Amino acid sequence: MDRRGGQEAAGPGIREAKGLLYEQLARIGRALASPVRLEMVELLAQGERPVEGVARALGLPVANASHHLRALRAARLVEARRVRTTVRYRLSGPRVHALLREIRALAEEHLAEVERIVRACYRARDALEPVRREELLERVRSGEVLVVDVRPPEEYRAGHIPGALSLPLEALERRLASLPRDREIVAYCRGPYCVMALEAVARLRERGLRARRLEDGFPEWQAAGLPVATGEEEGSAEDVCP
């Protein structure tokens, strides 16, 4: 294809096809042009859920959650399957959450508002630096830390860091006495903007325990190709290390 004056020289057929192509690409942008749908992508990255589970997790009416899920499904970002009388939704592939991570990184790099929110709402609540994935692997290898997953049990069962203890926020108070005081505790949840790990770390420190949070969450751990366990059973700490 020739280029003249920096513009593509193409017949009307090619130009029309290109316009149609970009219209299809724009479907993805329109489907994600909603803070609720972006949060749904993060939620479904933890594992599939019925519409009622999505609504409950995000504090939405079921009809509202269903509307947003249909929009994501229309853009082929989520899939649905029927299990008996229930329809369960899941991401259509790992690239969907990868796109969310890219959007997040782009926003952090270019939007000053994102930096202000992170500084005011996250760093102000936690003066200690989060634990990086590589550091966590090394410290688990040496037996220095206990890893706790503070997400709801169904998300833990769908996938978790091997060796992590399932410790949802609502169970934290009654299990405090069983937690070790001779090791640091590292909490993780759904992602870098998830507040459950922040809340867990604050409660643990109030009780005199040494605690920090993972820099991101389970989907990022999985996307990095690190070991993942599923089901109810907790693996040993050594299982975390490849």
Image (tube, rainbow, N blue to C red):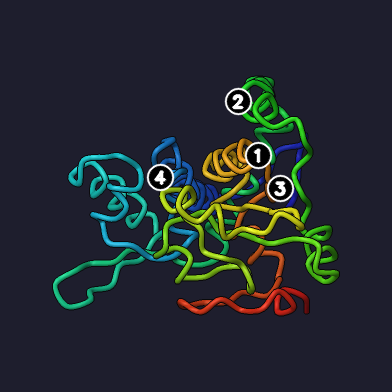
Q: Which mark is residue 115?
A: none
Quick check: 87 left or right of 92? left
Report which residue position mark 4 lands on: 31
The answer, for residue 88, to whether it is visible in the render is yes
Mark toward the start of the polypeptide (1 vs 2): 2
Q: Which residue is mark 1?
A: 205
Q: Nearer the viewer, mark 1 or mark 2?
A: 1
Q: Is residue 219 shown to the viewer in this render?
A: no
Camera-near label (4 vs 2) is 2
114 w.r.t. 49: above or below = above
- Residue 121 - label: 2
Q: How far across and down, in percent of the image, does residue 30 sit?
A: 42, 41
Distance Cα–Cα, label 3 vs label 1: 18 Å
Going from N to C along the chain, the mark reached first, 4 or 2, is 4
Q: Which residue is mark 3?
A: 215
> Residues under labels 3 and 2: Cα distance?
15 Å
Quadrant of image for the C terminus:
bottom right
Q: Which image quarter holds the N terminus? A: bottom right
Q: Residues within 10 Å of mark 2 (few under 14, many from 20)?
A: few
The amino acid marked with disc number 4 is Ala
| Residue type, label 1 | Arg
In the picture, measured across the screen, residue 207 lies left or right of residue 45, that is right
**Front one among 85 and 155:** 155
Q: Quadrant of residue 222?
A: bottom right
Label 3: how many Cα within 10 Å (few below 14, some 14–19, many 20+):
many
Alpha carbons under labels 4 and 1: distance apart: 40 Å
* Amino acid type of the residue that numbered disc 2 sits on in the rendered structure: Cys
Secondary element at image label 1: helix
Q: Position of residue 178 (x, y in %)?
A: 57, 60
**Is the Cβ of the residue at disc 4 closer than 8 Å to that at disc 2?**
no
Secondary structure under tag 3 reads strand
